[in-house]
Image: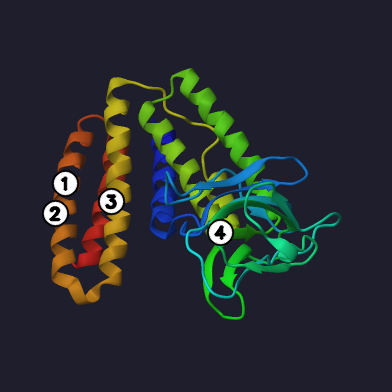
């Protein structure tokens, strides 16, 4: 039982750390002019990112874009009003190893002489209409996670950017992460099939999701460390007691960590956060009492969380 508690506590600690630093994925597109796009790996045809701003204001990231990866970007532009001057399409990807940069999908929009498929930029008449275009290129070589503009639509002769497709390009370490993630995901499915405690497998799944969020933020090494921290043995089998208490431990640990960070970052709101943390301590005392009737090791783990919170607020 001790090894099982240790495994869960480790997962809680690392999950708490990752909850604090995760932010939303960084594939960007306003959707006002570029109404949808798909980013694919040119060599494999794998879909990496997809956006349809008619149905969702956030792109869906299936797999990270990696430094030096050959990309195919298919996008739709809705020029919803005519304007003076020209529009300009630009790409900040490196030129593809062979072939043209732009490919216009046949339609009614008239580019005239402005369609220059082998140039990184092209200017064309600002007329109302809709067109589809494909842009080919290679993701820039980066030393750390970096936001890169794949395609940009702007007003020619000005600095006015009307819309853009921006994605986070990661270092080559993303390949290592993906392989490790696939192994851990397969392990999770085997644990679920073997009847491991649902509370534990839920924690396991949350850590996988948090690792993906870290990667989308650019913290590839952190995501790898998080996956490596998931124990490879000692998984608790499901019993009535464990099914109830393991999720409670997880909730208590994560809540304690989040509240603690909030408290430390908001000294100016000391009194308010102190009341919140003190309420959390009371909840932990009740949970500890329940756990002590079942397992003293589990009770000790909760006591440790409670003591750290007390120390934080000076109780």
Q: Earlier in the sequence, mark 3 or mark 4?
A: 4
Q: Is residue 308 left or right of residue 86?
A: left
Q: Is residue 218 left or right of residue 255?
A: right
Regarding mark 4 in the picture, which secondary structure is present there?
Answer: loop
Q: Mark 2 vs mark 4: give the one in front.
A: 4
**Contact (CB < 8 A) between labels 1 and 2?**
yes
Specify the quadrant that holds the C terminus: bottom left
Q: Residue at x 14, y 54 (%)?
A: 279
Q: Quadrant of residue 298?
A: top left
Check disc 1 and report the residue beneath it.
Answer: 283
The residues tagged by marks 2 and 4 sit, at their Cα atoms, a distance apart of 34 Å
Q: Mark 1 vs mark 3: give the one in front.
A: 3
The residues tagged by marks 1 and 2 sit, at their Cα atoms, a distance apart of 6 Å
Check disc 4 and report the residue beneath it.
Answer: 219
The crowd level at tag 4 (other Cα within 10 Å; few <14, some 14-19, many 20+) is many
Regarding mark 3 in the picture, which secondary structure is present there?
Answer: helix
The crowd level at tag 2 (other Cα within 10 Å; few <14, some 14-19, many 20+) is few
Check disc 3 and report the residue beneath it.
Answer: 255
Instruction: Tell me: residue 207, above or below residue 240.
Output: below
Q: Residue at x 31, y 35 (%)?
A: 247
Q: Earlier in the sequence, mark 2 or mark 4?
A: 4
Q: Is residue 308 left or right of residue 203?
A: left
| Residue sitting farthest toward the bottom | 158
- Residue 256 in percent (x, y) is at 28, 53
**Contact (CB < 8 A) between labels 2 and 4?**
no
């Amino acid at each position: 039982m001790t090894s099982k508690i240790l495994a869960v506590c480790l997962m809680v600690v690392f999950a708490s750390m990752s909850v604090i630093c995760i932010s939303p994925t960084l594939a960007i597109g306003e959707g006002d002019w570029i109404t949808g796009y798909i980013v694919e790996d040119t060599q494999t045809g794998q879909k990496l990112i997809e956006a349809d701003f008619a149905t969702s204001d956030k792109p869906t990231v299936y797999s990270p874009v990696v430094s030096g990866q050959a990309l195919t970007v298919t996008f739709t532009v809705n020029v919803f009003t005519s304007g003076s001057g020209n529009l300009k399409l630009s790409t900040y990807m490196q030129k593809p190893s062979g072939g043209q940069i732009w490919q216009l999908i046949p339609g009614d929009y008239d580019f005239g002489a402005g369609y220059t498929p082998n140039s990184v930029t092209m200017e064309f008449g600002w007329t109302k209409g809709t067109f589809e275009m494909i842009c080919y290129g290679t993701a820039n070589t980066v030393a750390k996670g970096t936001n890169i503009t794949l395609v940009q639509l702007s007003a020619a002769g000005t600095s006015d950017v009307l819309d853009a497709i921006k994605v986070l390009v990661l270092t080559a370490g993303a390949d290592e992460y993906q392989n490790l993630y696939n192994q851990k995901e397969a392990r999770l499915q085997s644990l679920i099939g073997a009847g491991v405690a649902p509370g534990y497998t839920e924690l396991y799944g949350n850590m996988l999701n948090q690792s993906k969020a870290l990667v989308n933020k650019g913290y590839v090494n952190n995501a790898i460390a998080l996956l490596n921290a998931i124990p490879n043995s000692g998984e608790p089998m499901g019993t009535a007691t464990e099914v109830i208490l393991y999720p409670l431990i997880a909730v208590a640990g994560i809540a304690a960590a989040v509240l603690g960070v909030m408290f430390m970052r908001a000294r100016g709101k000391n009194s308010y956060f102190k009341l919140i943390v003190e309420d959390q301590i009371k909840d932990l005392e009740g949970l500890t009492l329940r756990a002590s009737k079942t397992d003293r090791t589990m009770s000790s783990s909760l006591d440790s969380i409670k003591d750290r919170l007390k120390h934080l607020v000076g109780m």
